[in-house]
Image (tube, rainbow, N blue to C red):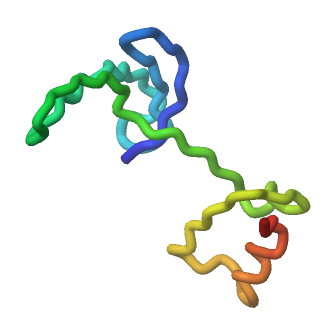
Amino acid sequence: MERDCIKQLQNNIHAVSIMTGKEKEQIAFLPRIPLVSNGLPFSFKRLQFPMKLANSMTINKAQDQTFQYCGFDLKELFFAHGPRRMLTNRIMIS
């Protein structure tokens, strides 16, 4: 999986700038892909782009902000003491 930055949106194709990997800084085009149902008593066709929206923020930038929903990537340790308390003390509980 790579990170891309959308440069141009069109009805049937998106132009993206590749931000990571071997093809970094190159432009790629993502076409709409038809998905057809299988194994159902009826059939339907859906067109979608092969991408997933993601937003992220560094810990320093997230300081002094309050979030209603939040997710963490804890694959690497980045705090010496109390990571859960530091990460979760500003998440709203409703």
Q: Is residue 41 left or right of residue 16?
A: left
Q: In this rendered view, identify the residue nearer to me: 43 or 62.
A: 43
Query: Looking at the rendering, in which quadrant would you find the C terminus?
Result: bottom right
* Residue in the picture at 76% in, 57% down: 68
Residue furthest toward the right?
A: 64
Give the image quarter of residue 78. Answer: bottom right
Closer to us: 12 or 61: 12
Vertical arrangement, residue 9 with respect to residue 53, above or below: above
List x then y, in percent, for residue 25: 48, 29
Describe residue 49's horizontal placement relative to residue 71 as left or right: left
Q: Which residue is situated farthest in the front direction here?
A: 41
Query: How many circles with numbers are drawn on the protein?
Result: 0
Q: Residue at x 34, y 32 (%)?
A: 50
Residue farthest top in this picture: 11
Image quadrant assignment for residue 37? top left
Residue at position x 80%, y 55% from top? 61
Residue 30 position (above or below residue 89): above
Q: Is residue 84 above or below residue 27?
A: below
The one nearer the camera, 54 or 7, is: 54
Is 19 placed left or right of 41 in the picture? right
Q: Is residue 34 left or right of residue 54?
A: left
| Residue 27 coordinates in the image, percent (x, y) | 42, 21
Residue 53 x/y as whole percent: 52, 39
Farthest bottom residue in view: 81
Q: Is residue 24 above or below residue 93?
A: above
Residue at horizontal 46 percent and vertical 10 percent from the top: 10
Q: From the viewer's side, name the closer residue of 73 and 23.
A: 73
